[in-house]
Amino acid sequence: MKKINYLLAFILFVFSSSIFAATCGPDDPKIQNKIIGLWEVGSGKARIKIVAYGDKYAGKMVWLKEPTYPDGKIKVDKNNKVESLRTVPLLGYTNLIGFIDKGDGKYEDGTIYDPENGNTYKCVITIKDENTLEVRGFVGISLFGRTDVWKRVALKE
């Protein structure tokens, strides 16, 4: 059973890595969208790079304020519900996936993973202005959730 869990974790890791390997290159002007870019979460603890893959959008953690534990070890997804994923580093982890542009600055039908509690939530992302996203994770209906405000991070040339 352990071998199956490790195999599933490996397949998930390879799949998410391949999505980003194909999409993290130069932005194609045909798919450029306001949501694409580097965003800092409300707490300032992480930065998420949002990219397009096909007609959907995903994001991964590309910067952590504290990338290591006090003992110097790299932070891992220790709260994941799947035991075999608890050793996966948080840096580079895909935590947003499946978002579809619904128009009017709304991106829906995706999920957000919270590594602080190991839960995955349905999510809606709303562009408030060119430098601000409202990211609402919820269970069931959006009434039962919380909103975080993310700010765009300017990329250095």
Image (cartoon, helix red, strand yellow):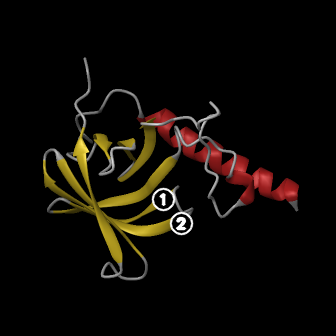
Dividing the picture into quadrants, the one containing residue 17 is top right
Residue 16 versus residue 148: which sits nearer the camera?
Answer: 148
Q: Are marks 1 and 2 in contact (CB under 8 Å)?
A: yes
Q: Which mark is residue 70?
A: none
Q: Which residue is mark 2?
A: 119
Residue type of the residue flagged with mark 2: Asn
Residue type of the residue flagged with mark 1: Asp
Where residue 39 sits: x, y (%)?
30, 42
The C terminus appears in which quarter of the rendering?
A: top left
Residue 77 versus residue 26: which sits nearer the camera?
Answer: 77
- Residue found at x 83% / y 57%: 4
Where residue 51 sits: x, y (%)?
36, 42
Name the residue at the top extreme.
157
Q: Which residue is mark 1?
A: 114
Left or right, residue 127 beside residue 141: left
- Residue found at x 36% / y 82%: 141
Dot 1: what SS?
A: strand
Q: Distance from label 1 to label 2 (Cα)?
A: 6 Å
Where residue 98 sits: x, y (%)?
42, 59
